[in-house]
């Protein structure tokens, strides 16, 4: 049984190699010389976003640096101290009084320290905007080649070929 399987396998391998050899000889690849006769761009329309800068004059506010008067800060400290004195007993009362005075003074300083607009100055301000435009983009080239036998071939190529350039093409010839 093993001999039969080996013989069948050998016959299949022999038959497939002969078939491949015959198929290989049906076509022949030749190298032929050709001259570039044209190479025309192939374009496609694409949408592009083109940046554009737009500038204008704007009014920018000028602020005064307000600050609380000494009297306002002192009044805030006193009021805060009185309120703080209402809390705690003994040394806790003293700490609450001091803390109330500090918080009152800080609150008065922040309340009266608000900035106010005292004028405006003009400043140039620019923004970049993007405008969509339609443009032609080269996506390849349609190149035509003519062999010395007068055969003309046209291919789509990635690069543009200079007219008159000599190139070599692989030509497959069927031997049927």
Image: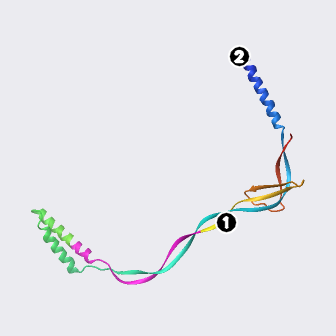
Q: Secondary structure at mark 2?
A: helix
Q: Residue at x 49, y 80 (%)?
A: 56
Circle number at residue 136: 1
Q: Nearer the viewer, residue 18 or 87?
A: 18
Instruction: State the residue in front, 73 or 113.
Output: 113
Residue at position x 21%, y 73% in the image = 105
Q: Is residue 106 above or below residue 29?
A: below
Badge 2 or badge 1: first in the primary sequence: 2
Is the C terminus in the top left, top right, bottom left or bottom right quadrant?
top right
Query: Separation of disc 2 and disc 1 at Cα?
Result: 70 Å
Indicate whether 113 appears above or below 46.
Answer: below
Residue 97 falls in image quadrant: bottom left
Q: Is residue 80 magenta?
A: no
Q: Is residue 110 left or right of residue 26?
A: left
Marker disc for residue 38: none
Q: Which residues are magenta?
A: 105-132
- Under circle 1, the secondary element is strand
Image coords of residue 33 (percent x, y): 86, 53
Q: Which residue is mark 2?
A: 2
Residue 9 lies left or right of residue 94; in this view the side is right
Front residue (pair 119, 112)? 119
Tell me the mark number nearer the camera, choosing from 2 and 1: 1
Asked whether the residues under the numbered discs 2 and 1 touch, taking CB atoms below 8 Å apart as contact, a structural biologist would say no
Image check: 8 left or right of 101? right
Q: Position of residue 103 (x, y in %)?
A: 21, 69
In the rendered image, residue 51, in percent from the top left (x then y), is placed at: 56, 70
């Amino acid at each position: 049984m093993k001999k039969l399987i080996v013989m069948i396998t050998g016959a299949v391998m022999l038959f497939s190699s002969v078939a491949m050899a015959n198929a290989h000889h049906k076509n022949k690849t030749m190298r032929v010389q050709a001259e570039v006769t044209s190479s025309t761009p192939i374009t496609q329309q694409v949408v592009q976003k083109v940046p554009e800068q737009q500038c204008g004059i704007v009014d920018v506010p000028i602020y005064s640096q307000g600050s609380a008067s000494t009297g306002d800060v002192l009044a805030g400290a006193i009021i805060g101290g009185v309120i703080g004195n209402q809390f705690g007993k003994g040394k806790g009362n003293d700490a609450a009084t001091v803390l109330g005075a500090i918080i009152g003074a800080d609150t008065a300083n922040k309340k009266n320290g608000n900035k106010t607009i005292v004028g405006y100055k003009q400043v140039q301000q620019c923004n970049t905007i993007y405008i969509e435009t339609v443009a032609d983009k080269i996506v390849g080239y349609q190149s035509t080649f003519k062999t010395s036998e007068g055969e003309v071939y046209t291919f789509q190529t990635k690069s543009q070929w200079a007219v008159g350039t000599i190139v070599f093409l692989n030509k497959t010839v069927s031997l049927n």
